[in-house]
Image: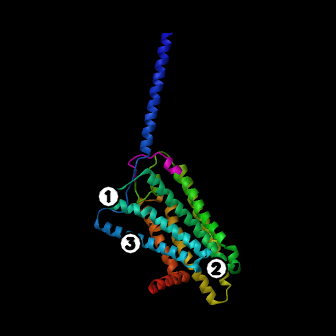
Amino acid sequence: MSNRVSVGGRFGSRAADMGKVEERSMWRWNQTALEDFTLQGLFDDSFNHLCLFLLIMLVFLTAVSGNSLTILLICADPRLHTPMYFLLNQLSLMDLMHVSTTIPKMATNYLSGKKSISFVGCATQHFMYLSLGGAECVLLALMSYDRYVAICHPLRYTVLMSRRVGVMMAVMSWLSASVNSLIHTSILMSFPFCGSRIIHHFYCEYPAVVKLVCGDVTLYETTVYICSVVLLLLPIILVSTSYGFILHSVMQMRSAGSKRNAFATCSSHLIVVSLWYGACMFSYMRPRSQRTPLQDKVGSVFYSIITPTLNPLIYTLRNKDVAKALKRVLRRDIVA
């Protein structure tokens, strides 16, 4: 009887010890899972890279001021309170938030000499840039429908593109992209990370972060690739269809002036669409085997910095209504 008790006691103590070991291992895993990442960044300490950094900051300030000015003009001028400019307002807001998600952290790390970013900060950055990028893909496609209605059905424009429809388009863009980003961010950041945790990028972009994951993530990468293709191809199909109908309507116009006005109305949107979708396709529709860290950085700089900077300039310089609104604001300031 005493032998049974002693054996049972030994088994009980061993089970308790194993439980403690498991608890300690789980605690250590949780601690390592939440360790900081290191962002390699874009620049080193050389003089040439200092000049590049100053150039990027100049572009960043241009993007912030240009998009902020566009938002203020559309809000301040009653003549611009139409569905088209409401959607343009949302586009400028997305661009403003996009550059503010990545560039300030990059600049802070470069100026301070630190390259770290917390686990929560990396997850937040990944969620924000993916949400904003996806929302812009959807919004640009919906803006092409607005142009289609304005040119092909001008008499029914106020019915087909009411303020309610414009708000629904904006909500659809924000909501669908946010849900998609939340799912992907939650899955990605739940994987175990190993190695040096050095992200060869200047922010927590998906292709750079997924390389740090331990284990086989082929199925997840394939799923992300398919989602990226769908999220890009469906809007491109909608844009192409809308502009196919627009081109058909323009060719049937007899007045040369009407044709010029139609092309002028659509040209700004077409340029922005080409820049944005082109950069996104370069970054996300290439197989992993064909990617290099340098190419990922170049593509990210283009669609996360250059495109948000060019968008307000394109719409301001090529859009007569926005240009007139800017002139009216400047005249008020001069008179005051």
Task: Say which amino acid is labelled 2.
Answer: Leu
Segment colored magenta: 186-198
The residue sitting at 46% across, 24% down in the picture is 14
Looking at the image, tell me whether mark 2 or mark 3 is earlier in sequence order: 3
Which quadrant holds residue 142? bottom right
Task: Say which amino acid is labelled 3.
Answer: Leu
- The image shows residue 81 at horizontal and vertical percentages of 59, 76
The image shows residue 199, relative to residue 66, as above or below, that is above
Query: Label 1, label 2: how many angstroms apart (C-alpha)?
Result: 53 Å
Residue 58, which numbered label? 3
Query: Label 3, label 1: how many angstroms apart (C-alpha)?
Result: 20 Å
Which quadrant holds residue 250? bottom right
The C terminus is located in which quarter?
bottom left
Task: Say which amino acid is labelled 1.
Answer: Gly
Looking at the image, residue 37 sits to the left or right of residue 143; the answer is left
Q: Classify mark 2: residues with Cα within 10 Å, few (<14), some (14-19) or many (20+).
A: some
Q: Nearer the viewer, residue 247 or 123?
A: 123
Looking at the image, tell me whether mark 1 or mark 2 is earlier in sequence order: 1
- The image shows residue 221 at horizontal and vertical percentages of 53, 53
Q: Residue furthest front?
A: 336
Residue located beneath label 1 in the image = 113
Residue located beneath label 2 in the image = 247
Find out whether residue 144 is within the magenta segment. no
The residue sitting at 46% across, 48% down in the picture is 213
Looking at the image, residue 53 sits to the left or right of residue 150; the answer is left
Residue 260 seen from this side: yes
Looking at the image, tell me whether mark 3 or mark 1 is earlier in sequence order: 3
